[in-house]
Amino acid sequence: MKIKHLQLIEGAKQAEGLTVIIDVFRAFSLECYLYDMGVKEIRPIGSIEDAFALSEKIPNSILVGERKGKKCEGFDYGNSPSAVDREHVGGKTVIHTTSAGTQGIVNAQNAEEIITGSLVNAKAIVSYIKSKNPETVSIVSMGTRGIRTNPEDELCAEYLISLLEDREMPDIEERIASLRINGGEHFFDPDNQEVFPEADYWMCIKHDQFPFVIRVEKDELGFVGRKLGIGGT
């Protein structure tokens, strides 16, 4: 298995084979929580305009997304997992657009298969990849707005690669804890809690808690991320 570690939107454009698009804070952590809350399906999309257009085609859909961290105007929710109301989203289709994560999906046009990447389901991602045993795996850390690297996505990529290569990362707990002051500082700014609530930080660093992956497919309406259980779950 050839493993390629790529970065940002340019990296997504170069991705091939089975591709993992990583966005830890917060897009693809949020998507795992959304499936845990019982959403019907998640439709990642590139632009705000396309999100509104798609919502017109899907009755009772939920608009979720951000630009520069802030909830898109007219959307139901921003990119905050702690802000989502489980009762409101259960059974619904979520249309999701973000500055980094979903941009990686729409730009990975040469990928044979796409799954989303986060710490919260990292071991499930690795189990899925090993079960597929592809010739090439592209691990794409999307960074901040897809234009500059950040510590959390780089750490997630490193963690996935170590597990794929059957190498232990004995300091994973310490490395994740260090994100509090190196990558996740904005979640602890008392003046910015409306956009980046502290609760989001703690939700996004809970590694390996979900036993499923989100595989991105395409149908007549565009991209759709579907939950796939690992190990019969």
Image (cartoon, rainbow, N blue to C red):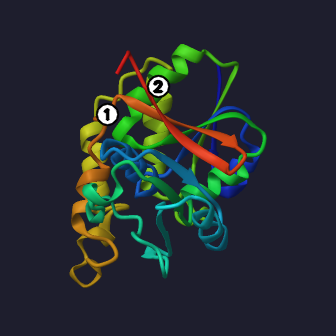
Instruction: Mark 2 or mark 1: name the one nearer the start of the chain.
Output: 2
Q: Is residue 70 left or right of residue 204?
A: right
Q: Which residue is mark 2?
A: 126
Rendering coords of residue 27 (x, y %)? 45, 56
Residue at 56%, 66% in the rendered image: 99
Count of labels in the image: 2
Q: Residues within 10 Å of mark 1 (few under 14, many from 20)?
A: some
Rendering coords of residue 154 (x, y %)? 48, 48
**Relative depth, front residue between 225 and 89:** 89
Q: Is residue 126 left or right of residue 168?
A: right
Q: Which residue is mark 1?
A: 208
Q: Secondary structure at mark 2?
A: helix
Q: Quadrant of the C terminus?
A: top left
Rendering coords of residue 43 (x, y %)? 56, 52
Q: Which mark is residue 133?
A: none
What is the quadrant of residue 82 in the picture? bottom left
Residue at 34%, 76% in the rendered image: 195
Q: Residues within 10 Å of mark 2 (few under 14, many from 20)?
A: some
Q: Extreme bottom residue here?
A: 191
**Relative depth, front residue between 183 and 114:** 114
Residue 223 vertical position relative to residue 213 in the rendered view, above or below:
below
Rendering coords of residue 121 (x, y %)? 38, 36
Hey, what amino acid is under mark 1? Asp
Hey, what amino acid is under mark 2? Val
The answer to the question of whether label 2 and label 1 lie on touching residues, with beta carbons closer than 8 A, is no
Residue at 33%, 48% in the rendered image: 33
Q: Secondary structure at mark 1?
A: loop
Q: Quadrant of the N terminus?
A: top right
Q: Is residue 28 left or right of residue 112?
A: left
**Relative depth, front residue between 52 and 19:** 52
Residues at marks 2 and 1, CA–CA distance in whole angstroms: 10 Å
